[in-house]
Structures are given as C-alpha cells and as structure tokens.
Image (spheres, grey):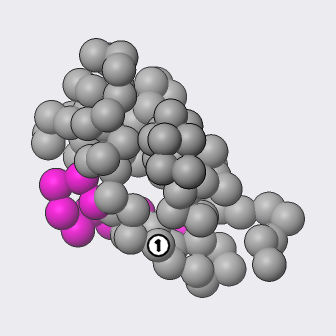
Amino acid sequence: MTPETINITLAEQIDTHCLRLRFDDDTEQVVDFKPFLSHAAHPDIRSWLQPEKFASFRLEYGELVWGDYELCFPMIDLYRNEIAHRDSIESAA
C-alpha cells in the first residue's frame, strides 16, 4: 500500500547514475537513472549523463532535484522505482 504522502529522507549515490533513496516510511529503493537518461530524446535531459553533473543532485523539501528543477521525477515513480520512458513501457507491452 502506498502512503498518502511520501518524502525522501536520504539520497546516497552508490554508482555513477545509481542512487539509494530512503523514504519517510523507511522504504528504500536503489534507482538506476542511466537507462532513463540514455533513452531521452532531448539533449538537455541526456546532459545529466555527465557524471559530475548527475552527482549534483540534492534533496529539497523531501524531493530529489537537479539544478533549478531542471531534472526531477514524480515521487511515486521514485517510490515504486518505475522511471522508464512511456514509449519504452508501451513497446515492452
């Protein structure tokens, strides 16, 4: 069951494009962002593949963000570890 509100309490980089996320209900996910970033059509999103740029993430008000919200993800997608591109999901079906 998904809680009504979800916040990230810890974001730890464990590999170049992988983060361990802990949520306020003690759920943890290891999210690999590389497939999402690699399949992005827009060059501004693909630019976050640069390791030093990707590593500039931060938590702000319980949300995971990069830059001035230049890259962010819906909380429920992070909580469920489901950040695939929509076209990837549809082609897999």
**Range drawn in magenta:** 9-18
Residue 83 image offset from top left, x and y in percent: 49, 49
- Queried whether the magenta region covers residue 86, the answer comes back as no
* Residue drawn at x 28%, y 16% as measured from the top left: 43
Q: Mark yes or no: residue 32 visible.
A: yes
Residue 55 image offset from top left, x and y in percent: 23, 46
Q: Mark yes or no: residue 64 visible.
A: no
* Residue drawn at x 32%, y 34% as measured from the top left: 39
Residue 49 image offset from top left, x and y in percent: 20, 36
Residue 78 location, quadrant:
bottom right
58 lies left or right of 50: right
**Nearer-the-camera pick, 88 or 59:** 88
Residue 51 location, quadrant:
top left
Residue 13 image offset from top left, x and y in percent: 27, 62
In the image, residue 87 above or below residue 81: above
Most frequent secondary structure within the magenta stretch: strand
Look at the numbered disc 1 and give the secondary structure of its residue: strand
**Nearer-the-camera pick, 21 or 31:** 31
- Queried whether the magenta region covers residue 16, the answer comes back as yes
Q: According to the image, label 1 marks what residue?
A: 29
